[in-house]
Image (spheres, rainbow, N blue to C red):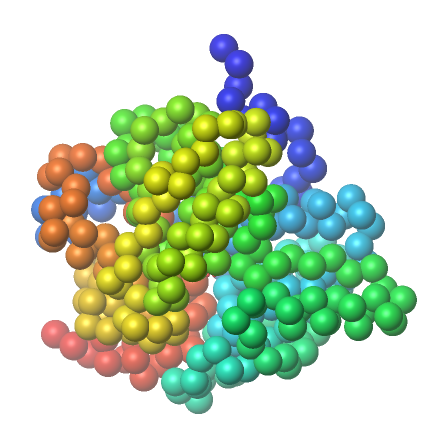
Amino acid sequence: MTDPLSRIRHLPRVALAHLPTPMERLGRLGAAIGLSNLWVKRDDCTGLGFGGNKVRKLEFDLAAAREVRADCIVCGGVAQSNVARQVAAACAKLGIECHLGIMRGRVSVPEPAYGESGNILLDRLYGAIIHEIEWSEDRNSGLQRLVESLRKAGRNPYLVPYGASDALGALGYVLAAEEIVNACPNVRWIVHASGSAGTQAGLVGGLLALGHPARVVGIDVDAQPERVSADVCRIGKEVAALLGCNDWRDDLVEVARHWSAGSYGTSDKTTREAIQMAARLEGLALDPVYTGKSLAGLIGLARQRKFAEDEPVVWIHTGGGPGIFAYPALMASIASTA
Ligand SMILES: Cc1ncc(COP(=O)(O)O)c(C=O)c1O
């Protein structure tokens, strides 16, 4: 039988992640929300730099940077960007200079720790060079300017786009789809946090290429469900093309809109409930920006009976743990609530 992922297996890739990540049954959480076949894919355990979903993407993006002999990497995001932290760690490991554009103006600073603890502290620890830039809705123009200024200074920079969400990075999640299907062949639903859209585009493209009928539900964490859907479709089509797959359909993309707490970086009652349930029922630590919202989405959808009681449902823990320490007051209030 021909390998449906053969086209991407020979692409340049650097080994950065601990793969495959574990799949674990969530027995107590499942029982609490009426799902007897609930699993977690532990992509918080990808290893490098406290782990998370972006390490998979960087295996492809940073290999491409090596191919063009880049002498530095440019990436960025808000102070608590998880991708920035994972890029900084990967650059340290590969011995390449890392420039991070840290964006002001996307989130209002919720607590003093936000600007100095968690991810930003780790960025500095891993030796990244920090540039303060302004947030722009298109997400990448500030980073592009950073690339241009490095070029003018005679450098050969490589841009890892916002969220590492280009088609190349998304291939990391094509391979994650294969891992999930290998571990749980009859998986029916895959649920995860969706923001810059590369994770979802890779999962949907991977399942399509594998001919697997599982549905992916991305939980919008940005309060921009239409933008997220459009980006998943755009990147997903490119992923399908890289896989040699001609049957991409936009109706494969499902983004759930009710668990974003109204804006990026804020949380609501559903987020806080999800963080507490994961901690107390399963010993899992979730952050309030991504995984808290995505589990809130899963819990909400289970209560709406979107999933049959015994259908295999896989929730992906996409990481983000260091972000917990940027919100000490919020997390302390969740911890002290009975
Ligand atoms: C912890 C975490 N989960 C999920 C996501 C969303 O992934 P994507 O940007 O590929 O949609 C991110 C993105 O930054 C993240 O940091």
Q: Residue furthest right?
A: 154
Q: How many marks?
A: 0
User: Residue at position x 49%, y 42% from top?
Assistant: 236
* Place of residue 116 in the rendered image (x, y in percent of width and height, measured from the top left): 52, 83
302, 152: nearer the viewer: 152
Residue 159 relative to residue 275: left or right = right
Q: Residue furthest top?
A: 1
User: Residue at position x 78%, y 44% from top?
Assistant: 67
Residue 13 relative to residue 70: left or right = left
> Looking at the image, is 132 positioned above or below residue 172?
below
Q: Quadrant of residue 241?
A: top right
User: Residue at position x 53%, y 19% from top?
Assistant: 3
Q: Quadrant of the C terminus?
A: bottom left
Q: Quadrant of residue 35?
A: top left
Asked whether residue 34 appears in the rendered view, the answer is: yes
12, 146: nearer the viewer: 146
* Place of residue 230 in the rendered image (x, y in percent of width and height, measured from the top left): 44, 52
Asked whether residue 120 appears in the rendered view, the answer is: no
Q: Quadrant of residue 147?
A: bottom right
Residue 55 relative to residue 37: left or right = right
Q: Residue furthest bottom?
A: 112
* Place of residue 176 in the rendered image (x, y in percent of width and height, measured from the top left): 46, 39
* Place of residue 53 in the rendered image (x, y in percent of width and height, measured from the top left): 47, 52
User: Residue at position x 74%, y 57% from top?
Assistant: 158
